[in-house]
């Protein structure tokens, strides 16, 4: 019995692709971390995207190898799970475990690194306490029995096929193209088919220029759009304020709001009407929950979104928030059942969407309610024991102090 960490670098082939102005995706790109203490296990996930936070799976993997995991396991072994859970709710992950980030030399650790560690720790604690992650993060908040989710029209599918095959529709997000006329036609076709009651948002993924943003937004508003997501280059606070004032179009920010400081800057600049909360982008469940509370306090709307092609823990993490947030503008909820073949799934049970109603239901079981399948093993990248990190199949070198003790 002992302590072990295992890192999986997961690149599942996607049955259908996903295209938007910032990226084209044909495989998943996630890191999954499994922490084990004796007979207790927790699994977490992050999905770094360079165009969102500047992080990649390479940079997070490198940063993780500098985290003193012996210190983490020491705290997990010596502090009662209920006490750690209470401290995490009050102080957040980085303040609860400051010793893990000494290697960052005073700079903030990447949000995906924090997310990877935090989600694994939360899952482990919840399994020890026999509670769900939602109960740990937001105790006492009622859980919705079901929740409608949005449908996303990306650039890999035409609008007519989308409307014919992806309903019923509760909220539609349209990924912008490089042709405003096409986007106007798309919004018009959606409005014609679905009427005025279904909200429609166009996500430009930072692809508009300041000089074109105002006329683009006006055209889309005339076609029936309700919101525009991240229309300008990241953190263009003054131009975003000018866009809102000139057009009256509501702006939801995503890539611009990765940290609490970003959210405060956006509010101070009057740069947005809503924010997109994504667990990996925003530094884990605890930070995401705080961002939601901040948005509420400032009168902002919020969406609970996902990174494309999340593989398991991240999906159930965002659902834990969503099913306790009846005031969210919309919830994306993940599409692992659509993106990946059953035979490739690395977690069980798979996080599904009820495709008849396009709704999700609460997760059952402690933690994220997931276990790794046999398929996960093929993606093993590194394993940590008392000897440190080792690649698959490596024989750990004896530690000097252990050699001394056997002489």
Image (cartoon, helix red, strand yellow):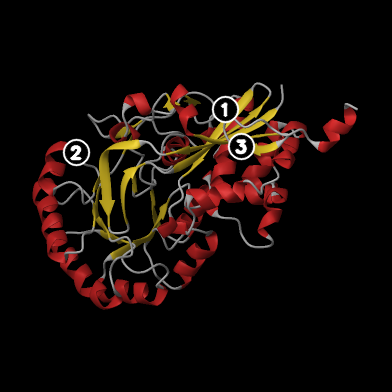
Question: Quick check: 170 left or right of 282?
Answer: left
* Quarter assignment of residue 23: bottom left
Q: Quadrant of the C terminus?
A: top right
**Separation of disc 2 and disc 1 at Cα?**
34 Å
As helix, strand or loop, the secondary structure at mark 2 comes to: loop
The residue pinned by badge 2 equals 166
Near mark 3 (Cα within 10 A), the count class, few <14, some 14-19 or many ≥20, is many
As helix, strand or loop, the secondary structure at mark 3 comes to: helix
**Which is nearer the N-term, disc 3 or disc 2?**
3
Near mark 2 (Cα within 10 A), the count class, few <14, some 14-19 or many ≥20, is some
Measured from the top left, where is residue 330 in percent x and y? 33, 47
- Specify whether residue 283 is in view: no
**Separation of disc 3 and disc 1 at Cα?**
13 Å
- Specify whether residue 16 is in view: yes
Q: Which mark is residue 9?
A: none
Q: Which mark is residue 121?
A: 3
The residue pinned by badge 1 equals 131
Of residue 147 and residue 395, the one placed in the foreground of this image is: 395
**Separation of disc 3 and disc 2 at Cα?**
36 Å
């Amino acid at each position: 019995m002992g302590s072990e960490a295992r890192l999986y670098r997961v690149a599942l082939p996607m049955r259908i692709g996903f295209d938007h102005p910032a990226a084209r995706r044909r495989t998943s790109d996630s890191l999954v971390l499994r922490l084990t203490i004796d007979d207790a296990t927790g699994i977490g996930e992050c999905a770094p995207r360079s165009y969102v936070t500047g992080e990649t799976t390479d940079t997070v993997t490198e940063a993780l190898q500098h985290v003193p995991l012996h210190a983490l396991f020491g705290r997990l072994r010596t502090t009662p799970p209920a006490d750690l859970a209470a401290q995490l709710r009050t102080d957040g992950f980085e303040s609860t475990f400051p010793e893990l980030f000494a290697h960052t030399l005073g700079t903030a650790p990447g949000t995906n690194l924090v997310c990877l560690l935090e989600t694994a720790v939360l899952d482990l604690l919840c399994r020890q306490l026999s509670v769900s992650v939602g109960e740990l993060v937001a105790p006492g908040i009622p859980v919705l029995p079901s929740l409608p989710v949005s449908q996303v029209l990306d650039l890999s599918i035409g609008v007519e096929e989308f409307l014919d095959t992806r309903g019923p529709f509760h909220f539609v997000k349209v990924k912008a193209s490089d042709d405003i006329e096409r986007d106007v036609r798309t919004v018009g076709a959606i409005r014609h088919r679905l009427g005025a009651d279904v909200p429609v948002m166009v996500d430009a993924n930072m692809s508009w220029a300041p000089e074109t943003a105002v006329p683009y937004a006006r055209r889309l508003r005339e076609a029936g759009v309700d919101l525009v997501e991240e229309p300008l280059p990241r953190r263009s606070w003054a131009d975003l304020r000018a866009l809102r004032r000139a057009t009256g179009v509501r702006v939801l920010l995503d890539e611009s709001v990765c940290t609490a400081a970003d959210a405060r800057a956006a509010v101070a600049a009057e740069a947005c009407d809503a924010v997109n909360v994504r667990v990996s982008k925003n530094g884990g469940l605890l930070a995401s929950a705080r961002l939601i509370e901040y948005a509420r306090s400032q009168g902002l709307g919020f969406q609970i979104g996902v990174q494309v092609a999340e593989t398991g823990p991240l999906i159930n993490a965002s659902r834990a928030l969503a099913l306790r947030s009846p005031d969210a503008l919309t919830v994306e909820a993940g599409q692992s059942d659509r993106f990946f073949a059953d035979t490739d799934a690395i977690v069980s049970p798979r996080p599904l969407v009820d495709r008849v109603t396009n709704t999700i239901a609460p997760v059952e079981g402690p933690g994220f309610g997931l276990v790794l399948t046999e398929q996960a093993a093929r993606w093993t990248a590194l394993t940590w024991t008392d000897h440190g990190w080792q690649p698959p199949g490596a024989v750990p070198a004896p530690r000097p102090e252990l050699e001394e003790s056997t002489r």
